[in-house]
Amino acid sequence: VSRFEDTCAGIGDVDSEAAASTQRLLDGKTKPRRSLGRLEDLACTIASITGRSPPSLPTKAIVLMAGDHGVAQEGVSAYPSEVTWQMLLNFARGGAAINVLARQVGARLVVADLGVSGPEAAIPEVRSCRIRPGTANFTLGPAMRPDEAVVAVEHGMAIAQELVEEGVGLIGIGEMGIGNTTAATALLAAFSGEPPRAITGRGTGIDDATWARKVAAIEKALAVNRPAGKSALEILAALGGFEIAGLAGVVLGAACHRIPVVLDGFIASTAALCAAGIAPHAAKYVLASHRSVEIGHRLVLQALGVEPLFDLGMRLGEGTGAALAMPLIEAALRLVHEMATFDQAEVTDTGR
Amino acid sequence: VSRFEDTCAGIGDVDSEAAASTQRLLDGKTKPRRSLGRLEDLACTIASITGRSPPSLPTKAIVLMAGDHGVAQEGVSAYPSEVTWQMLLNFARGGAAINVLARQVGARLVVADLGVSGPEAAIPEVRSCRIRPGTANFTLGPAMRPDEAVVAVEHGMAIAQELVEEGVGLIGIGEMGIGNTTAATALLAAFSGEPPRAITGRGTGIDDATWARKVAAIEKALAVNRPAGKSALEILAALGGFEIAGLAGVVLGAACHRIPVVLDGFIASTAALCAAGIAPHAAKYVLASHRSVEIGHRLVLQALGVEPLFDLGMRLGEGTGAALAMPLIEAALRLVHEMATFDQAEVTDTGR
């Protein structure tokens, strides 16, 4: 049996009794019942995912996957494809936004090349998982073959498993890839049935003419690749990107090991939607961080059944929103562990 | 000249050129322009407050002030007044939510008794600034005399000045006081002209009968104390609380020293509204953290002209929301300091 099938088969339901047990712990703490709002929900959700009450304070990692996109040839982005590789170098040197935020929150950053164009394996700090230097232009045919998509997913599963074996208990996901909002929007259109023009956003900040080309490229991709009736994996292969497939694998791998995954923006969340299409229970293992400016993000989060923790008008990707959510998640868990109960503190408990 | 007058006279306008300079720094960093959204605004706002571009990474403190309220006799809370003193002890022992969060974010916590009922100066970890053991019941007359309000405000100014002298550059404010949502709602009604029943919330979690008593108490307080046409300081004295007046003083003191103040929920934000009534420029020195469940909070934040960073359905107070916002504020500043520019990283900059 393959890693792919094994991992998917290993994803079970979450543990609602652990969640209820953590809520009871929180109800005994010196505060009005439920007055910590969604922080209480967060702690309970992590209990349900890990099956532990109280859940322990996790070691944190962020997996950032990069890939290039053949559809960039259609002129759908404000930046040329070479920027993907240039940013890999920036990640390796520690100068990108995600480096700053991962350092701040104490998360290990794993950067992987799933299919960037540019010199391969030239950056020792970047893990080479390259399938090909960029997907094919999906306005002309599938972005990748199904077997390539499986390999990309399995790279993600392997990285998740390694992190778990090294003691990581909370994984954020992020991405970099010029053209990848176009791929994610095509995937969302295929999964939701929404018309591309209703869900296509401005990506890195494109003008009206570029936006029109982006919508046209997605419409053509749907006409050429005909996703209706196909499996989630087939749709992912036809319309996705290597980094999106890889991140879907991280979600599946983490879910198999009962580790919560913190989403980032539109593209990373769409990768989770692909994972949930492959193994439906996977959606229960993800936590939303922010809601991005990208208009499709709201729909993706709804489809996953998760509510974002904040909306700061961000649209950068890289895992930046996931990193910013980590202190909130950690706060929720610390409160369960460290707050005194009414009994311990001898505080009168007349609230309900 | 008094500390009160000196401090208010020292509050000037913020520095819009420093903000513009920080935005220019951010525009050179390796990311699409403005893609960090409100994190970019945060960095610029702190530049405008401090007058420095880039603003330095600040040492953080949270000032938590406690006080009791005569109006609690009207049966407006789910908890008895004794809980305020019990919670002081809990803060001193490190078992309350704010202790957990302040430890997590690396903020020094200063707890001050501005007017709690219960043994005075019995807890060495709590700074004694007690004016009286609780305000008078403001349904029968003013909560405090104007000179008492000035003393409370000056305690807050003194604490802010001490913190600044010790190198603190970011101050969060929080409160504890059974009955203080009733006082804050009365203040908001007086400042905004809104009818009490439209802006009265559920505080720590009260039932319908308690809510009706709370509305009636506020209506009676307004009828008895007649705030119309009075100065902000007179209104604060008539309808406020010692901890609310103290926190208004912290805001004024911080503003005088060009130090940003992170608001918490409804009561702490109402203290800032009182500060802005006393010295209008003071509103420019505050940053909103969360929007609480308490319905008046939205109005107070609007009146101050600030947008919350997140809404997690919290209603605890103590400075918990302020503490949770501190990593976001720190992230904004670290990004300005640590991200590479397009030139440094040799990344192609074709975005606008």
Image (cartoon, coloured by chain):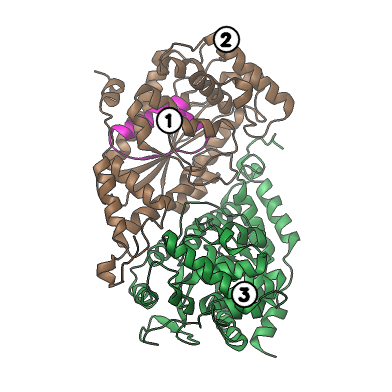
Chain colours: A green, B brown
10 Å crowding of disc 3: few (<14), some (14-19), many (20+): few
Q: Looking at the picture, how far across and down is residue A107, in whole percent?
A: 46, 67
* In the image, residue B136 above or below residue A173: above
The residue wearing badge 1 is B272
The part of the chain drawn in magenta is B244-272
Q: Are marks 3 and 2 on the same chain?
A: no
Tag 2: amino acid: Ala
Q: Looking at the picture, how far across and down is residue A16, in whole percent?
A: 74, 60
Tag 3: amino acid: Ala
The residue wearing badge 2 is B223
Tell me the tag on residue A223: 3
Instruction: Tell how many labels.
Output: 3
Q: Quadrant of residue A32?
A: top right
Left or right, B319 with respect to A299, comes to: left
In the image, is residue B269 part of the stretch drawn in magenta?
Answer: yes
In the image, is residue A55 part of the stretch drawn in magenta?
Answer: no
Left or right, B68 with respect to A314, comes to: right
Q: CA distance from mark 1 to mark 2?
A: 24 Å
Image quadrant where one finds the N terminus of chain A: bottom right
Tag 1: amino acid: Ala
The chain that hosts pointer 2 is B
The chain that hosts pointer 1 is B
Q: Quadrant of residue B346?
A: bottom left
